[in-house]
Amino acid sequence: MQYRIGNGYDIHKLVEGRKLFIGGIEIPYKYGLLGHSDADVLIHAIMDAMLGALSLGDIGTHFPPTDAKYKDISSIELLKKVKKLVKLEKYYINNIDAVIQAEKPKMADYISFMREDLSKILEIKKEQISIKATTMEGLGPIGESKAIAAQAVVLLCKDKPSFVE
Protein backbone atom coordinates (compact mmCIF):
# COMPACT_ATOMS: atom_id res chain seq x y z
CA MET A 1 0.00 0.00 0.00
CA GLN A 2 1.32 3.45 -0.90
CA TYR A 3 1.07 6.20 1.74
CA ARG A 4 1.47 9.97 1.54
CA ILE A 5 1.68 12.22 4.61
CA GLY A 6 1.04 15.94 4.79
CA ASN A 7 1.40 18.60 7.46
CA GLY A 8 -0.68 21.77 7.72
CA TYR A 9 -0.60 24.86 9.93
CA ASP A 10 -2.73 27.98 10.13
CA ILE A 11 -3.03 30.97 12.45
CA HIS A 12 -5.46 33.88 12.46
CA LYS A 13 -5.87 36.96 14.58
CA LEU A 14 -8.91 37.30 16.89
CA VAL A 15 -11.00 40.42 16.22
CA GLU A 16 -14.35 41.90 17.19
CA GLY A 17 -17.27 41.77 14.77
CA ARG A 18 -16.65 38.27 13.37
CA LYS A 19 -18.16 34.91 14.22
CA LEU A 20 -15.77 32.22 15.46
CA PHE A 21 -15.69 29.04 13.37
CA ILE A 22 -13.35 26.19 14.22
CA GLY A 23 -13.66 22.72 12.73
CA GLY A 24 -16.83 23.80 10.94
CA ILE A 25 -18.55 24.60 14.24
CA GLU A 26 -19.67 28.07 15.26
CA ILE A 27 -18.37 28.67 18.77
CA PRO A 28 -20.05 31.38 20.82
CA TYR A 29 -17.37 33.92 21.69
CA LYS A 30 -16.95 37.68 21.74
CA TYR A 31 -14.28 37.52 19.02
CA GLY A 32 -13.90 35.78 15.69
CA LEU A 33 -10.97 35.05 13.41
CA LEU A 34 -9.88 37.59 10.83
CA GLY A 35 -9.43 36.26 7.32
CA HIS A 36 -10.63 36.40 3.73
CA SER A 37 -12.85 33.34 4.24
CA ASP A 38 -14.42 32.44 7.58
CA ALA A 39 -10.81 31.87 8.77
CA ASP A 40 -11.47 28.41 10.23
CA VAL A 41 -7.89 27.58 11.29
CA LEU A 42 -8.56 23.88 11.87
CA ILE A 43 -10.11 23.24 8.48
CA HIS A 44 -7.39 25.34 6.83
CA ALA A 45 -4.66 23.25 8.51
CA ILE A 46 -6.40 20.01 7.47
CA MET A 47 -6.74 21.21 3.86
CA ASP A 48 -3.08 22.25 3.71
CA ALA A 49 -2.09 18.83 5.06
CA MET A 50 -4.23 17.06 2.45
CA LEU A 51 -2.82 19.19 -0.36
CA GLY A 52 0.72 18.82 0.94
CA ALA A 53 0.44 15.04 1.05
CA LEU A 54 -0.22 15.10 -2.68
CA SER A 55 2.29 17.87 -3.51
CA LEU A 56 -0.57 20.05 -4.78
CA GLY A 57 0.51 23.31 -3.16
CA ASP A 58 -1.48 25.01 -0.43
CA ILE A 59 -4.89 26.56 0.07
CA GLY A 60 -3.61 29.99 -0.97
CA THR A 61 -2.74 28.51 -4.37
CA HIS A 62 -6.16 26.93 -4.82
CA PHE A 63 -8.28 29.61 -3.11
CA PRO A 64 -6.33 32.89 -3.32
CA PRO A 65 -7.31 35.64 -0.88
CA THR A 66 -7.25 38.05 -3.81
CA ASP A 67 -10.23 36.26 -5.41
CA ALA A 68 -13.51 37.90 -4.42
CA LYS A 69 -15.47 34.65 -4.83
CA TYR A 70 -13.80 33.32 -1.67
CA LYS A 71 -14.63 36.39 0.46
CA ASP A 72 -16.35 35.16 3.66
CA ILE A 73 -16.84 31.68 2.16
CA SER A 74 -17.38 28.81 4.57
CA SER A 75 -14.22 26.74 4.92
CA ILE A 76 -16.47 23.69 4.75
CA GLU A 77 -17.10 24.48 1.08
CA LEU A 78 -13.36 24.72 0.46
CA LEU A 79 -12.76 21.43 2.29
CA LYS A 80 -15.26 19.71 -0.02
CA LYS A 81 -13.24 20.94 -3.02
CA VAL A 82 -9.97 19.64 -1.53
CA LYS A 83 -11.64 16.30 -0.78
CA LYS A 84 -12.51 16.05 -4.49
CA LEU A 85 -8.86 16.66 -5.40
CA VAL A 86 -7.82 13.79 -3.13
CA LYS A 87 -10.38 11.53 -4.82
CA LEU A 88 -9.20 12.61 -8.27
CA GLU A 89 -5.69 11.49 -7.30
CA LYS A 90 -7.24 8.13 -6.22
CA TYR A 91 -6.22 8.47 -2.57
CA TYR A 92 -8.18 7.88 0.62
CA ILE A 93 -7.85 9.51 4.02
CA ASN A 94 -6.36 7.00 6.43
CA ASN A 95 -6.44 9.37 9.41
CA ILE A 96 -6.16 12.96 10.57
CA ASP A 97 -4.43 14.11 13.74
CA ALA A 98 -4.89 17.77 14.65
CA VAL A 99 -4.31 20.17 17.51
CA ILE A 100 -5.96 23.54 18.12
CA GLN A 101 -3.86 26.13 19.96
CA ALA A 102 -6.10 28.58 21.82
CA GLU A 103 -6.01 30.22 25.22
CA LYS A 104 -9.70 31.15 25.00
CA PRO A 105 -12.33 29.99 24.42
CA LYS A 106 -11.91 26.47 25.73
CA MET A 107 -12.41 23.87 23.00
CA ALA A 108 -13.23 20.73 25.02
CA ASP A 109 -17.02 21.06 24.69
CA TYR A 110 -16.83 21.38 20.89
CA ILE A 111 -14.29 18.78 19.79
CA SER A 112 -16.78 15.90 19.56
CA PHE A 113 -19.03 18.01 17.31
CA MET A 114 -16.06 18.99 15.14
CA ARG A 115 -15.06 15.35 14.69
CA GLU A 116 -18.64 14.35 13.86
CA ASP A 117 -19.14 17.11 11.28
CA LEU A 118 -15.72 16.66 9.68
CA SER A 119 -16.24 12.90 9.39
CA LYS A 120 -19.49 13.50 7.47
CA ILE A 121 -17.93 16.10 5.17
CA LEU A 122 -14.88 13.92 4.45
CA GLU A 123 -16.92 10.69 4.31
CA ILE A 124 -14.74 8.91 6.84
CA LYS A 125 -15.37 7.48 10.29
CA LYS A 126 -15.22 9.74 13.33
CA GLU A 127 -12.55 7.39 14.70
CA GLN A 128 -10.25 8.40 11.84
CA ILE A 129 -10.11 11.97 13.17
CA SER A 130 -8.24 13.03 16.29
CA ILE A 131 -8.59 16.61 17.46
CA LYS A 132 -6.85 17.89 20.56
CA ALA A 133 -6.64 21.37 22.07
CA THR A 134 -3.93 23.07 24.06
CA THR A 135 -3.19 26.48 25.50
CA MET A 136 0.08 28.32 25.12
CA GLU A 137 0.39 28.98 28.87
CA GLY A 138 0.06 32.74 28.34
CA LEU A 139 2.96 32.93 25.89
CA GLY A 140 2.93 34.78 22.58
CA PRO A 141 -0.09 36.05 20.63
CA ILE A 142 -2.02 32.80 21.15
CA GLY A 143 -1.32 32.78 24.88
CA GLU A 144 -2.35 36.43 25.09
CA SER A 145 -5.71 35.53 23.44
CA LYS A 146 -4.88 37.57 20.34
CA ALA A 147 -4.88 34.63 17.91
CA ILE A 148 -5.83 30.99 17.44
CA ALA A 149 -3.81 28.43 15.48
CA ALA A 150 -4.14 24.82 14.40
CA GLN A 151 -1.82 22.11 13.14
CA ALA A 152 -2.82 18.93 11.31
CA VAL A 153 -1.18 15.82 9.95
CA VAL A 154 -3.04 13.77 7.36
CA LEU A 155 -2.09 10.29 6.21
CA LEU A 156 -3.42 9.33 2.79
CA CYS A 157 -3.30 5.85 1.31
CA LYS A 158 -3.58 4.70 -2.29
CA ASP A 159 -5.75 1.70 -1.48
CA LYS A 160 -8.98 1.99 0.43
CA PRO A 161 -8.27 1.19 4.11
CA SER A 162 -10.05 -1.95 5.31
CA PHE A 163 -11.80 -0.03 8.11
CA VAL A 164 -13.35 2.49 5.67
CA GLU A 165 -16.89 1.73 4.58
Image (cartoon, rainbow, N blue to C red):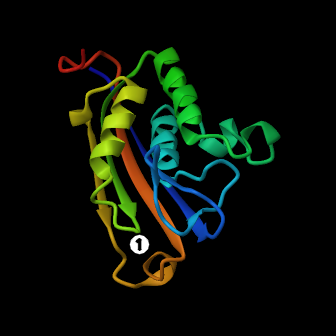
Residue occupying the point 57% across, 41% down: 75
Residue 17, quarter of the rendered image: bottom right
Question: Taking 71 as reference, is 91 above or below it?
Answer: above
How many marks on residues? Answer: 1
Instruction: Identify the residue position indicated by label 1 in the image.
Output: 104
Residue occupying the point 40% across, 68% down: 105
**Residue 47 as seen in the image, left or right of residue 119:** right
Note whether residue 102 is visible. Answer: yes
Residue with the most extreme left position: 163
**Residue 13 as seen in the image, left or right of residue 21:** right
Q: Amino acid at mark 1?
A: Lys
Question: Taking 50 as reference, is 134 above or below it?
Answer: below
* Depth order, front residue of 80/109: 109
Residue occupying the point 61% across, 49% down: 38
Bin the neighbour count of mark 1 within 10 Å (Cα to Cα): few under 14, some 14-19, many 20 and up: some
Note whether residue 155 is visible. Answer: no
Residue 82, quarter of the rendered image: top right
> Tag 1's secondary structure?
loop
> Quadrant where the N terminus lies?
top left
Name the spot of residue 72 as percent of width and height, x first: 69, 46
Name the spot of residue 151 as percent of width and height, x first: 41, 55
**Residue 93 as seen in the image, left or right of residue 68:** left
Name the spot of residue 28 as percent of width and height, x first: 46, 60
> Quadrant where the C terminus lies?
top left
* Depth order, front residue of 18/11: 18
Residue occupying the point 57% across, 27% down: 81
Name the spot of residue 51 as percent of width and height, x first: 52, 36
